Amino acid sequence: MIERTKVSNTRNAVIINERRQKLWTLLTKGMNTYEIAKELNVDHSTISRDIKYLTLQSQDYLNDLAKQTMPFMYQTSIEGIREILKESWNVYYSTDESINWFQRLAALKLAKECNEAIFKLVDEGPSVMYLKQLQEKLVQIEGR
């Protein structure tokens, strides 16, 4: 009896996953929930529940992706800005006579903006990471 229940649950899970896969496809085609329910021959409330489930699953995926990539993105952003900063100073201090004062002033302005951007990233980075940690703790508490 227990074995039959496991098989039945597995079969139901497969059917639900297949329906949700079709749901994604139909949503991307611009169909509304009533049209999708009719197309899949299920009740509208089933489609609404599936959309709610898929939305939560998507949010979890994006949260996990952000947690995994955020430190790397901060680091690569800062390194990229530093490269731009170096080039800005190279333009400003260049002895090339074809570079006029407007270009040198633009390079100074860009250097200032680079420094501001780095400061902002460094200032906000720890706060963003701390906020993510707090969100994780809250999810753990809510799960208990």
Image (cartoon, rainbow, N blue to C red):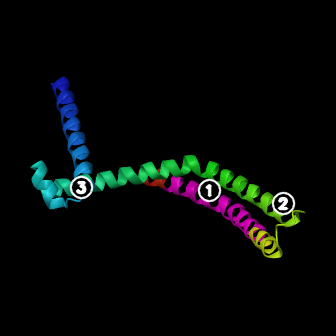
Q: CA distance from mark 1 to mark 3?
A: 37 Å
Which residue is rendered at x = 82% and y = 72% of the image?
100
**Residue lying at 50% horizontally and 56% vertically, measured from the top left:** 138
The label nearer to you, 2 versus 3, is: 2
Q: Circle 2 sits on which residue?
A: 90
Q: For mark 1, does the 10 Å Cα neighbourhood hold few (<14), some (14 to 19), or many (20 or more) residues? A: some
Mark with earlier residue (1, 3):
3
| Residue indicated by mark 3 | 29
The amino acid type found where label 2 is placed reads Asn
Residue span colored magenta: 111-138
Closer to the camera, 87 or 18? 87
Q: Is residue 128 above or below residue 24?
A: below
Q: Is residue 144 visible?
A: no
Query: Relative to residue 42, is residue 108 drawn left or right?
Result: right
Q: Would you identify the image quadrant in which residue 134 lies?
A: bottom right
Asked if residue 37 lies in the magenta stretch, the reply is no
- Residue under label 1: 129
Mark 2 or mark 3, earlier in chain? 3
